[in-house]
Image: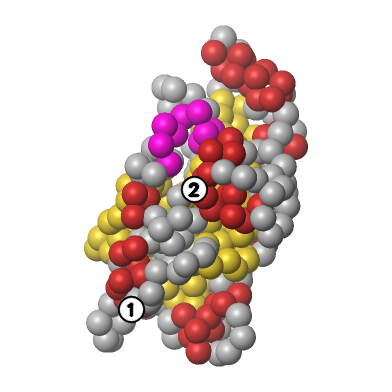
């Protein structure tokens, strides 16, 4: 299923995009798309049955904002340097273990919402990423197969980053990762049963129409299942938690000088195979 949330920011309603591309209203069945729903197999079954029977009301999508496909996000765990080609372009050694940092849930915006260039920023960068949404509580998992079994679905994430804040200002990476609007998510949450192999997905990103990133999750150093397993050894993952699994080569940081960092007025578009497409215009904060 392709689950999404539509409407004004803070007042989104749950919806479904059916197999024919028709937007359907879920608000009569469930209050929201969130961790509680993803952990409830019976509720998900009711959605599938209603969709299959053609019982869900049609929503007119004209002028309707698409919000983040997940409400009440718990935590956003991010994996750095998780693509072989990205490590090569930045001159970094592939890590022996996954690099973990966090994004606050309030960085999340809709897939077509405005992204704000922070005040004082000189090095705002783009990163297309596969987002993994947890559907079952994960603690001390033993295998990558177990990790995959705890995934409810997948989405497109834009891990916007300010490289000067991240790398040159001391301390942790978090300063360059948690600026306002720095995690567009969506348009859909695609349930795991519709993604045959998360290690065979193409990822692309364009800036002002120019292709910058053209990668595949086959280049991941640590697979989706292994990432979930690994993270579960250090913290409990709950339904509605998100893991951003890293970005392929092609970011501004890896380009020759002068590096083409983002500025107000730039337009970024990104997509992942089968998971939809985003478009953001940048403005000054």
Of the two numbered discs 1 and 2 on the same chain, state the one appearing first in sequence. Answer: 1
Give left or right: position of 145 versus 127: right
Q: Which of the two residues, 263 or 122, is positioned nearer the viewer here?
A: 122
Does 178 sit above or below residue 55?
below
Asked if residue 197 is among those painted magenta in the image, a careful observer would answer yes
Quarter-wise, where is residue 86 in the image? bottom left
Q: What residue is rendered at 37% in x and 50% in y?
A: 217
Number of other residues with Cα within 10 Å of mark 2, as a class: few under 14, some 14 to 19, many 20 or more: many
Q: Which of the two residues, 119 or 72, is positioned nearer the viewer here?
A: 72
Name the spot of residue 198 as percent of width and height, x first. Answer: 43, 41
**Callout 1 secondary element:** loop
Q: What residue is rendered at 52% in x and 63% in y?
A: 98
Question: Cα distance, mark 1 to mark 2?
Answer: 24 Å
Residue 224 marker? 2
Q: Which of the two residues, 54 or 225, is positioned nearer the viewer here?
A: 225
Does 110 sit above or below residue 147?
below
Quarter of the picture holding the C terminus: bottom right
Give left or right: position of 97 versus 37: left
Name the spot of residue 153 as percent of width and height, x first. Answer: 55, 38
Number of marks drawn = 2
**Callout 2 secondary element:** helix
Name the spot of residue 261 as percent of width and height, x first. Answer: 37, 78
Is residue 248 visible in the rendered image? The answer is yes
Q: Which segment is the magenta one?
A: 189-198
Asked if residue 187 is among those painted magenta in the image, a careful observer would answer no
Quarter-wise, where is residue 29 in the image? top right
Q: Which residue is mark 1?
A: 91
Q: What residue is rendered at 43% in x and 82% in y?
A: 123
Q: Which of the two residues, 284 or 48, is positioned nearer the viewer here?
A: 48
Number of other residues with Cα within 10 Å of mark 1, as a class: few under 14, some 14 to 19, many 20 or more: few
């Amino acid at each position: 299923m392709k689950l999404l949330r539509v409407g004004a920011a803070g007042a989104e309603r749950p919806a479904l995009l059916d197999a024919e591309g028709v937007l359907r209203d879920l608000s009569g069945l469930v209050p929201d798309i969130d961790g509680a729903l993803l952990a409830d197999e019976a509720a998900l079954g009711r959605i599938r049955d209603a969709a299959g029977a053609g019982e869900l009301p049609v929503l007119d999508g004209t002028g309707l904002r698409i919000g983040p496909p997940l409400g009440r996000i718990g935590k956003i765990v991010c994996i750095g340097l998780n693509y072989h080609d990205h490590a090569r372009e930045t001159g970094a050694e592939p890590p022996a273990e996954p690099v973990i940092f966090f994004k606050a849930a309030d960085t999340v915006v809709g897939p077509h919402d405005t992204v704000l260039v922070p005040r004082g920023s000189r090095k705002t960068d783009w990163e297309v990423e596969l987002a993994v949404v947890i559907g079952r509580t994960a603690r001390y998992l033993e295998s990558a197969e177990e990790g995959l079994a705890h995934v409810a679905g997948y989405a497109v994430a834009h891990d916007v980053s300010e490289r000067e804040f991240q790398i040159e200002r001391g301390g942790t990476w978090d300063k360059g990762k948690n600026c306002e609007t720095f995690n567009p998510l969506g348009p859909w949450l695609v349930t795991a049963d519709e993604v045959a192999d998360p290690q065979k997905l193409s990822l692309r990103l364009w800036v002002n129409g120019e292709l910058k990133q053209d990668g595949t999750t086959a280049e991941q150093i640590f697979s989706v299942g292994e990432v979930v397993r690994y993270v579960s050894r250090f913290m409990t993952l709950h339904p509605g938690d998100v893991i951003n699994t890293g970005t392929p080569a092609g970011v501004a940081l890896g380009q020759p000088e002068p590096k083409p960092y983002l500025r107000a007025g730039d337009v970024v578009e990104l997509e992942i195979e089968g998971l939809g497409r985003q478009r953001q215009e940048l403005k000054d904060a």
